[in-house]
Image: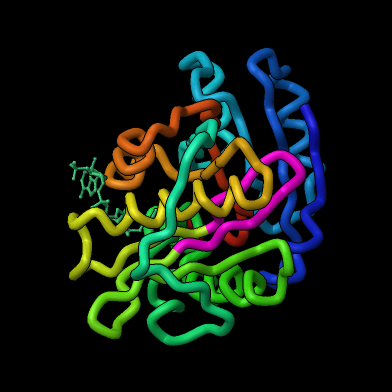
Amino acid sequence: MIKEVLDWDSKFFGFPVEKIVLDRFFNEEQFRALLAESSADVVYIFAPQDLSPEQETTIACSGAVKYDIKTTFEKQITSGSISSKIVKVSESTDELERLAWAAGVDSRYNSDPRFRPYFRPLYSEWLRKAFLNTDSAVLAFMESGKIAGMVIISLTEAAGKIELLAVAPEFRGRGTGSSLLEAVGAVCLEHGKSLSSVVTQQKNIPACNLYSKNGYIITRQEAVWHKWKADNREDV
Ligand SMILES: CC(C)(COP(=O)(O)OP(=O)(O)OC[C@H]1O[C@@H](n2cnc3c(N)ncnc32)[C@H](O)[C@@H]1OP(=O)(O)O)[C@@H](O)C(=O)NCCC(=O)NCCS
């Protein structure tokens, strides 16, 4: 069992945020003690997705609520291509910002009512940072002069990581998402990365189907719970 103070989150949200990571064999007494000694306003609890019903009850009885089954997809990249409709963008626009929000619509920051006021600023910040980070690229799929879709890729030591991906509602179902993933493949190969990864939510069926259809496979799943300090919870 690991407990960690999350400095970036605490600074961004303006209140203390901590994280506890549970393994399959976590000690329930220790878990309760860790939570009891926490002074954070909210603790993220990361846990294996297949805990026993008793373990799930222990977490739920602490007052935590499960908001996400974080699902990581990966793909070994062997090919890629960049459609002539895809351009690299170097500054934000309102369309891109709306797409960034669309990318997070199923995220735990939008699902948890206490985080919801911070959801759009958080995803706008994610987009803003992509333009500042020299290891990131923002690609837009253009259709009739409009940005139909976008993907943010960041290059890590091991992989080309998809940070955000979204297609505007009126352009969905026409292969735009798949085309953006083809472009991700090309960027990975261009930078010598043979692996691409992306994190999404299990409940985001269109996204999970998109990644599966394009050769990505699930490599990790974990549940994420939020435990708010009692005097901060909406139901108190
Ligand atoms: C997920 C998303 C990017 C897909 O974009 P898209 O351009 O519509 O995707 P494509 O047209 O390339 O579809 C490719 C495959 O994705 C899956 N898919 C796309 N939309 C789907 C839907 N509404 N329901 C189920 N599966 C869907 C299908 O397997 C589809 O293949 P098919 O057309 O042969 O059935 C788009 O729905 C979107 O922007 N959603 C909101 C933002 C989001 O969830 N982003 C991902 C964050 S990780």
Q: Would residue 74 be visible to someone looking at this image?
A: no
- Residue 124 x %, y %: 54, 75
- Number of marks in the rendered image: 0
Foreground pick, 139 / 170:
139
Foreground pick, 107 / 142:
142
- Residue 69 x %, y %: 46, 37
- Residue 138 x %, y %: 54, 69
**Residue located at (70% from left, 71% from top):** 12
In this picture, residue 205 sits left or right of residue 182: left
Q: Judge whether 91 appears above or below 214 on screen.
A: below
Foreground pick, 33 / 145:
145
In this picture, residue 144 sits left or right of residue 193: left
Q: Determine which quarter of the picture holds residue 147.
A: bottom left
Colour pattern of the rendering: rainbow
- Residue 33 x %, y %: 78, 32
Residue 10: in magenta span: no
Residue 152: in magenta span: yes
- By secondary structure, the bulk of the magenta-drawn segment is best described as strand
Magenta part of the chain:
151-163
**Residue located at (18% from left, 70% from top):** 170
**Residue located at (51% from left, 25% from top):** 49
Image quadrant containing the N terminus? top right
Q: Would residue 56 be visible to someone looking at this image?
A: yes
Foreground pick, 222 / 100:
100
**Residue located at (38% from left, 40% from top):** 211
